[in-house]
Structure formats: C-alpha cells, structure tokens
Image (cartoon, rainbow, N blue to C red):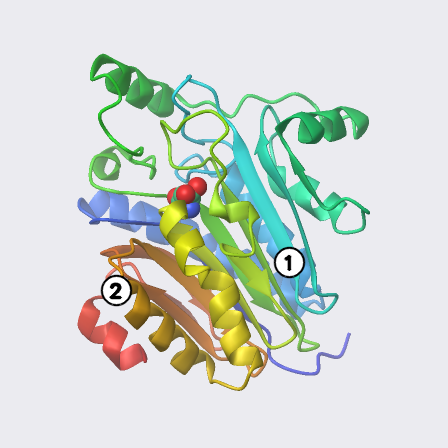
Amino acid sequence: MILQMQPKLIIHGGAGSSLQGKGGLIAVRNSLSQIVAEVYALLLTGASATEAVVRGCQMLEDEPRFNAGTGSVLQSDGQIRMSASIMDGTTGRFSGVINVSRVKNPIEMALFLQDADDRVLSDYGAAELARELQIPSYNGLTDLRLKEWTLERQDNFKRTMAGVVAEPEMAESSGRGTIGVVALDGYGKLAAGTSTGGKGFERIGRVSDSAMPAGNYATSQAAVSCTGIGEDIIDECLAAKVVVRVTDGMSLQEAMQRSFTEAKRNNRDFGAIALDATGAISYGKTCEVLLAAYHNGENIGDTLEWNDQELIDNW
Ligand code: ASP
C-alpha cells in the first residue's frame, strides 16, 4: 500500500464551559489519544478517510464518557434519541440519521445510507431501517445519565442542557459532548463524521445540528465537524460555511478565524475541528473548552488546556 501523502486526523469529544478536576482531564486525554493513535494507525495502513471516520466515531460512541452512542444524554421524556452523519468529501455525499433509538452505533447507519437513494432518515424511518438491517436492539443508558436526568426531573428541568461529559469530576462543569472525527487519508481524500445524543432534556422532536450540513460537512477541499449548542451551529451554518470559504479559495486558518470572529460577535456557544486537503489542521471555539485531539503525522496533540492566547497563536 503506497500512500501518496501523509494522513492527518482530528477528533473531538465535545465542548464545554470549563474542565475542572485533574482526574477528568487525564482520563479524557488518555481516551482521546488512544482513539487518535488507533485510527491514525488505520490510515497508515491505507484506510480511506471515510473508513477512518467511521472507526473513530464507533470508538467514541462506545466510550461512555462522551454524549453519543453509549452514554448519550436523555431527552425531556427520559428517552435516548441519537443523531449521526457522515460526509465523504470525495463523492460529495452527506448521509445521516436523526433521533434514532436503541442502536449501539448510529454512525454505522449513516455509513449504510451513503449509498442509499434516501440518505437522511428520521426517527420512524431510521427505526424501520434498523429493523431491516437487523441491527440488534441496544440500550446505551448509563447510571450517570439516569442519575443526571432524575436530578433534573426533581428540579423540573430548569437546565437547558445536560452536563454531557460523563466523568464525575467533570459532569457538573461541562457543557456539551457530541463526538466527531475528521480525516485526510493517504490519497488526499477528506471525510467528516459527527454523532450525538443531543443537548439533553430537549423537547421530543428537536433536531440536532449533528445530522445537518451545518454541523458536519466536507468537500474535496476541506472537512469540518462541530459541537456545542446545535441551534447556534445551525444559525451560523458553521461547518458548511468554513468548508465553502476554503473551497472558494480562503486558507483553512483564515476561514476558521473569520467564521469564529463572526460567531463571537453573535454570542454563539460552540467549537469545531477541521482539516484541509493540504493537510492543515485547525480548531476553534467560542466556549471555554474544546475536547479535541489530533495526529499531525509526527505526534499527537490535544486542545484540553488550550487557552485564548494559544487560539490566537494557532491562527
Ligand atoms: N451539537 C449537539 C446538539 O445540539 C450537542 C453537542 O455538541 O454536544 O445536538
């Protein structure tokens, strides 16, 4: 397998308001860097960007610490409904599922839909597809999520979203915890994938950005996955905006900088990870913490202790 270029990889486990508790930070760092190492090794063996994105999303969905797959937050009625999408930058195809229940890895359904005529399915249709594909019924509920929901119920759901990083030291302090993977493979191809349990405590039928081009988008030039308040991501059309700016000739850094400057001005609350076809890696946030890690071909780095000054240096 001869690679034509050095693969690049960036993943996230959500964004939040602060990262307190060393135990939390170290545990998140270990889990993100293990996943980066394993998925990057796959890219080195010649895996495609889409294959790497799916594998990375599966691993992050299976990690109860993050709000996707196992460990998803509960909605206002106490149910888990998950959303996931993939965009293959080479074929230019977006596919996904919205508010699907009782499956272990929603990203696998998004992958199946890459080749379907109808590429985005919501609750009832997604359940039908899960049945057709004979996906085993799976309950991704964890004790921590149930406890969190019960506490909120006692408080009459005053919070607008869950503490979605399932780490006791971090749960109270963190904001959101969707997962995402963006990969550039050894043949110069890009893909992005995003998967979420949603905001937590939301109304039934609320649609997350994670299965929309606003939250997950890729072309042959750039790929982006977002996390944070879905409504803010949709209002900025963040992933598609960054990718279109790069496709129209802006550098990735410039496109991210301009998009996040606008977002700050509009008081948005989110973060994003991005790659371009030249191998540039970028990340941005308007919230305090972005739980992201990357492999730049030489080594693994992360954004867990990244502050606003470094943000400016990064740009
Ligand atoms: N963006 C997700 C949503 O609003 C939440 C998250 O990123 O944690 O559904």
**In the picture shown, does residue 16 fall above or below 198?**
below
- Residue at (77, 44) in percent of width and height: 118
Mark 2 surroundings: few (<14), some (14-19) or many (≥20) residues within 10 A: some
Question: From where the camera sits, is residue 12 visible?
Answer: no
* Left or right of 118, for residue 34: left
Q: Which residue is mark 1?
A: 87
Sequence-earlier tag: 1 or 2? 1
**In the picture shown, does residue 276 fall above or below 50?**
below
Q: Amino acid at mark 1?
A: Met
Q: Amino acid at mark 2?
A: Lys
Quadrant for the N terminus, please.
Answer: bottom right
The image quarter containing residue 304 is bottom left
Mark 2 element type: helix
* Left or right of 289, for residue 114: right
Residue 217 x/y as whole percent: 57, 61
Q: Which residue is mark 2?
A: 264
Question: Disc number at residue 31?
Answer: none
Of marks 1 and 2, the one in the foreground: 2
